[in-house]
Image (spheres, helix red, strand yellow):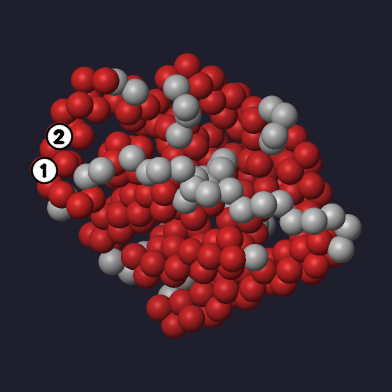
Amino acid sequence: MVWVMACAFGMTACYTLGIMSHFLAAMLVPALTVMAILVTMICRFYVVGPPGGIFFIMAAAIGAYSPVEVLQVPTMVGLFAMGSVLGCIIAFCYSVLVLRLRAPDPVVPLPAATFDFVVLDAVVIGLFVGLSIALAQVLHLERPYWVPVSCLAVIQGASLRAVWNRQAQRILGTGVGLLLSWGLLLLPLTPWSIALTMMALTIVIEMTVVRHYGFATVFITPLTILLAEAATLGHGSASSLIGTRFFDTVLGCVVGLMGAVCLHSPRFRTVVSGWLRRAVPKRLRS
């Protein structure tokens, strides 16, 4: 429950900062870059499992590109916080039920955090996530929240081969998922049908993501589109939305692959690690 509540608070904070940066165009890229660095540091220090900080950055990116007015910010943040609290309540009820059936798992002590794993990797990842957002801004993409998310999903691979495999799986899975999304968007969607569809997609994703990432991406794609675009569905062309999302994904994956090449280069790590070690206090270098 501590983990769940901490994640609820973190996602609400990221969404709030993201939606605030929407009104300061010059601060959007720096704000999301710093958030990506801090989120990655925290997730690595506390050994948060996959997908790591992806959903925190997704919440921030969706907020940053939400077409809202200043007076709507408290309402939007309040709705997001209500959803987070509801998630905590559901997790609490589930935990009470499960703990009646079996004993809780023992608390595993955290492994020793190293400077390169927590700080160096986080800074490199955050900077490339920021680069992906900057490219989206330069290309004048409309609400390109999927660009930094795709970049972060790809760059987090354990090895360069894993990054390449994840990039290929994400692009192919997204392509098939967009076809599924296109079919769903052609249906006469209502608030209830959207909610039920998202529930069904979530169940399928949770059952498949631990088995095959690419196959799960087929269902992750329509879920995220419904999640981010539910309020504006029916006000634009479905084909245009699908094409835009595919371009966003490819752009994010390409930047993520570039970042992974740097991240897994021994020479690059040695040079950048030296710069960072000189820039931080000695007590934080171990």
Disc 1 crowd rating (10 Å Cα; few below 14, some 14-19, many 20+) is few
Q: Name the one closer to the observer, 268 or 273.
A: 273
Residue 116 on image: x %, y %: 30, 36
Mark drawn on residue 274: 2
> Do the residues under discs 2 and 1 have CB atoms within 8 angstroms?
yes
Q: Is residue 221 above or below residue 169?
A: below
Rendering coords of residue 207 (x, y %)? 78, 39
SS class, disc 2: helix
Residue at far right of view? 101
Q: Which residue is mark 1?
A: 278
Seen from this angle, which residue lies furthest left?
Answer: 278
Identify the residue shown where x is 79% and y is 47%: 203
Q: Amino acid at mark 2?
A: Gly
Distance from label 2 to label 1 (Cα)? 6 Å
Residue 104: where, in percent of width, then height? 74, 56
Label 1 sits on a secondary structure element that is: helix
